[in-house]
Image (cartoon, coloured by chain):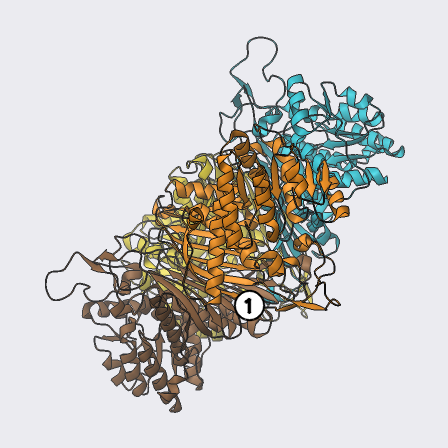
Chain colours: A yellow, B cyan, C orange, D brown
């Protein structure tokens, strides 16, 4: 694994747990963790349960006894690491968004397609697909229970930078993070809604905004800022007191899906009181589903096939043995948390690698999300004009 | 009053009740009701409590003992009736949307401004401003409790035409209704959010859609279709089995407000399971408010001024004596319904007329909403390009 | 009608509205209202819409052109008025609880049975039976949708006397009110749960408590105290500053129902934050229903006959045309309020009187609730020992 | 650790995780697990991460390199194991309820008190005390934020044996489980409410019921039945098709607390649709708190010290860094699950053992819960008569 901050901790918890909960055809060995700071990565290896550590990610690629490389770094290094790992025949799990640019994502999807011929697997880490309620939504749509999809409305709202004195952490710098709320959390709702509906976004009209344009440079960090690694101050000259925010604080867009639905999306870090509020509602001609990540054990389902007087939004507690991923966990009604989505992801990834099948979402799926992010960015730059999402198939041509 | 269908019944209930609940400087006499069908308007007069009826709205304008004309017809006759009433010195309450076109709305706002000089009052019937929780939201914003407004997200979702066999009632015909979901329910969330934030929408990027383009012509009608009056079939030739839907089924748009906020709006009649789901969330730098018309007695308020560990969305039951409009109603926690918003509206209208002050929302406010609707329509026609809302001040020039 | 305070206002609103909303075989004339204070009852007559007023309830009984007497006074005068009215051949609607003592209630039930032979109708005003969601719960149980009832849990929580400085209004005096939270709001949940389940409470084990034993005597009153009429201070000697609370602040009890269910009940005026929180949950072998009066337009229904993975608590918005009482009101999703339960009650009462059928709940039903209240009181006095509910059939023997 | 079923798995997950998440003064080694079935315990050791296994719990007590014994067996073996472990100087964590009888619990509490003199620690595993929202409730009460406690209402509702064909697992047999819903889940709400209020239950009036008295004997088991170990069928003679349920299906009781509050409790396995519904509401003179285990990341807090018009039930997402136990977990709004309460429990236990302080709840606390359970059982047997809870101090005399 490369990276030991927030995502590294979440992935490690999942790697440690997956074989304890699920019967799998392979057993995970947590061989080597990589990070830039020797002291910190050594501590992380010890705390998170890795056998060894290194400060050079090339060590993971070089070792023959390592089969899988898990990329948990900021987006600017995804492409380099993943491409090297695939070239070396390692199965790769790469955090989302797949890359910081469409070009990188195209290269990664192409490399994944090539490697696949040789039996090398790759997966993009949109972990929320494995929240049982989300998987169940997808299953309901796939079974036709919602009929023709008419509307998608998706928001991912947080509030951790409402305070203008919150520092300029790496997630607020375009060179490291690629984009702001859009790529960090907007990417999740783009992938999730496409996954659940089985449809693709074809065009968007977008507005983005940076409400607070200058922020103090960070000294120390924690929480969502945990992934800051290295100094945020520029190398040349004395550290200025503040720096410019180069990413969006919020992004809103309307979209059309290829199945005919209208959609609205909003990603923001300025929604006071909303801590991790990924909410999705999908209206079809036969029913509606609603999901809220802050209550991830629940799914609201409106089934228009029931007798009219009895129709209502049913709060399904997706914690039972007959719900996706849940038979291995606790008794009825005992809820799971955020981190379990990663354990489920690892289960499916390990199973795919061990049985020689393709895990999803693929790098091509990751590229498709990147293409939507790119269309959103272009639309916003062009004054919210309607912007088609570039086809992923161009990959083939490239 | 002109009109005796859904809106006519709601207004009558309020006119009958307002003096029973509130101490007012004037007492309402329900003198004359007008409708096109003699039998139906006679029945309505009897049932709804009007002293007399007529089939010609000019009778209301002509009678000296009538001070107020309440216009509850479909939008295509608003302008003609309101202009005549104002010219005759009658105070006018006109249902929303103010008119079917910007031109009509401009003429009405101009006439209202002229009439006002002579002490004639006018008001546009955006009744939801008088839901106590909505008034309270406005008060919180006005008191600075939300700080700088960052986000507005507003949806008004219904599902009464999801079935493709639902007939082509007047609300689905552009010549009668002006527009579809946009003007009918979208107008409400445009007005409500501008009212609560005290800001105006300056530009939009919109998509509209008509999911079901042909529908059977109506034979009979009831419920939301209740206001159908007159035959839907064209006069020349045999009645066809179906007709073309000439309005939008749904409209979605992103917007900017003049105070710097980003906003998303959605109005739809295709949101399965959502019956009357007007929902508004407003995020400010110091707090958030959330309102849901299906639970109109409640207001969710997140106050970021509280100690961090105790911050949360507080479900305020807006039913107490110290809440707007509520001291006259029932004991603590005894909820009110949809119709009460009209009683509150009549209270403020009667009070304004009796005391010689201007009620709000004015016809100018109604015009401003019309200008937003117009910008949305133009943006949608131009492929979702960014479209500025025309300034209302042009009225003066006109 | 006798009484013009809180209940009088609520009943008047319903009497004024019922013929406007429902097609009924008779039209209501609001002929005469009675109250002890001439000035106040004159004002009430004018405000509430009564043709005339009197300070002697015997005038209602004496007038030939009056068919119905509606008793909205405190419980200590129910028996006297109702017995006289029945004897005079007037149909009687009497507010709950039917009386302040079992003896009075027995006499009233007996008189009602006698009068019934002569075609005189009587009804006890448990208005919550006519909240559409409550009626729907009853219908679901009656249709067998819940299977065998296993549990009933009912609470009616308010908080209007948490402050020890809240004055000693009539509702806190045993001689006027009969009991405290128990008879005022506990009576509602006793009736409601027996109505919904179709079962009777057979025995109870109870605890009651008066948390604040001395309170200041009232000077003025409003809100829930609105029904204070006459001075609260004793006649002999100068008015003391405080008086003794002679009723319960809260009552809790466990019970058994004759169908085998276990039940818990709680009525309290000391539940801080709970304004009018009547909540009932009923678990059966095939399903569960949950109701909350503060969200009276909703019913939660868990249907264990659905596929296991799709079972959940369905929030049914009981506002549609196919729900009880609702077809006459507003379009889909437009909610009603507390007062509508009275309009529904008047609809059924008028219909029963006009068609010569028996309205429910009968005085016998009111007596049965009184018998439960009596068992609760006795159990509490005997240190919470198990106490059987006396059979109502003794009425016949009497 | 003794036991490898449901509780064994939950504890193992916590033991594996605690040092990964928290900085602690000691590191946990998972040395030895014990179970009766050799094959199953061997599998469990491997799966759950224990270094070795045994079928004789005396091996844990005998080994010098083992400092802590964690007792996760059914209640009938708690006393024997815990007493031996304490006598051998092992720190003991014992699952709840502490024992199956008051006598056993007294002996255990006495042994714990004796062992404590020698620095040996003991703790009873009421894990829900460590749900952050529950800890926060206790902190609010302790800080006086609720004022004088007036009401406690607590329910723990499940539905896993509603089906009469569900088999007679060990939890339905008095000889193994001690009692039914009462001891299994009722014990949790007794401890939790006493913990949060800081008050003790002094007397109860109870009803218990066994709705389904005969059930098929189990063949295989899973889920909540997972802890069945050994055959359920009697050894002598052919296995009968069914057996008698010897525990309660449900228990309801009213209670008084030593601080003057009234309380209601209900534990049931027959509440259709309620999967793991531990719900507690506590009303004080200054505020109210509400907790629901199915939404364990949330706490509803009504603060009557806020301005009246702004008072409401605030849904606090107890997931932030300034909430109990949460700073070590994920970023804002990322929820935790059921199992985390055990990790928190292990954190506090390890810290107490390592620093030589007493963990809570103590065995004396466990005994106090047992005394309440005993009073409930006796009250139910005596026809719901009021029954005082025996004082725990008798322990000292014993």
Q: Residue at x 62, y 25 (%)?
A: B227
Q: Hey, which quadrant is residue A301 in on the image?
A: top left
Judging depth in this view, the residue of B380 and A390 nearest the camera is B380
Question: Which of the 4 image quarters holds residue B275?
Answer: top right
Q: What residue is shown at x 72% (from left), y 40% (from top)?
A: C53
Query: Residue C48 in the image: x percent, y percent?
Result: 71, 40
Report the residue marked by disc 1. D150
Q: Residue furthest left?
A: D237
What element does badge 1 sit on? Answer: strand
Q: Residue D17 falls in which quadrant of the image?
A: bottom left
Left or right: D207 in relation to C190: left
Please tell me whether residue C154 is drawn above or below residue B29 in the rendered image.
Answer: below
Residue C151, x across and y down, in percent? 40, 54
Q: Is residue D293 left or right of residue B349?
A: left
Q: What is the quadrant of the N terminus of chain A in the image?
A: bottom left
Judged from this view, the residue extending furthest toward the bottom is D118
Q: From this view, report whether residue A30 is shown above or below residue B75.
A: below
Determine the chain carrying the residue at label 1: D
- Between A50 and C183, the residue placed more toward the observer is C183
Q: Nearer the viewer, residue A215 or D196?
A: D196
Residue B295: x, y in percent? 58, 46
Residue C204 placement, left or right of D299: left
Q: Residue at x 30, y 68 (%)?
A: D48
Looking at the image, residue C310 sits to the left or right of residue D280; the answer is left
Q: Position of residue A207 (x, y in %)?
A: 63, 45
């Amino acid at each position: 694994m490369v990276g030991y901050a927030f995502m590294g901790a979440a992935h490690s918890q999942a790697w440690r747990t997956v074989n304890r909960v699920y019967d799998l055809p392979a057993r995970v060995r947590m061989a080597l963790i990589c990070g830039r700071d020797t002291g910190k990565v050594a501590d992380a290896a010890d705390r998170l349960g890795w056998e060894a550590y290194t400060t050079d990610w090339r060590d993971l690629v070089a070792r023959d006894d390592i089969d899988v490389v898990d990329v948990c770094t900021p987006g600017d290094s995804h492409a380099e690491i993943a491409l090297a790992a695939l070239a070396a025949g390692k199965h790769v799990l790469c955090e989302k968004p797949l890359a910081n640019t469409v070009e990188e994502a195209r290269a990664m999807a192409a490399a994944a397609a090539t490697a696949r011929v040789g039996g090398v697997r790759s997966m993009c880490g949109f972990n929320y697909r494995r929240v049982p309620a989300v998987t169940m939504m997808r299953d309901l749509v796939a079974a036709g229970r919602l009929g023709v999809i008419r509307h998608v409305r998706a928001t991912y709202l947080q509030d951790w930078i409402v305070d203008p004195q919150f520092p300029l952490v790496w997630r607020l710098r375009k060179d490291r993070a690629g984009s702001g709320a859009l790529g960090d959390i907007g990417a999740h709702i783009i992938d999730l809604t496409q996954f659940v509906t089985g449809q693709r976004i074809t065009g968007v009209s977008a507005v983005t905004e940076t409400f607070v344009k200058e922020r103090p440079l960070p000294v120390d960090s924690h929480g969502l800022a945990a992934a800051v690694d290295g100094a945020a101050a520029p190398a040349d000259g004395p550290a200025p007191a503040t720096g410019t925010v180069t990413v969006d604080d919020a992004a809103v867009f309307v979209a059309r899906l290829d199945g005919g639905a209208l959609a609205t999306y909003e990603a923001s870090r300025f929604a006071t009181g909303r801590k991790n509020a990924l909410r999705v509602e999908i209206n079809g001609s036969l029913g509606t589903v609603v999901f809220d990540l802050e209550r991830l054990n629940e799914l609201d389902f409106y089934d228009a096939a029931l007798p009219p007087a009895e129709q209502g939004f049913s709060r399904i507690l997706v914690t039972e043995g007959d719900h996706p991923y849940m038979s291995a966990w606790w008794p009825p009604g005992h809820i799971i948390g955020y981190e379990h989505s990663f354990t489920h992801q690892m289960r499916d990834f390990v199973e795919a690698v061990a049985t020689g099948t393709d895990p999803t979402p693929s790098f091509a799926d990751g590229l498709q999300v990147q293409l939507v992010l790119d269309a959103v960015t272009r639309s916003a730059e062009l004054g919210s004009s309607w912007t088609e999402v570039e086809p992923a198939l161009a990959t083939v041509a490239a």
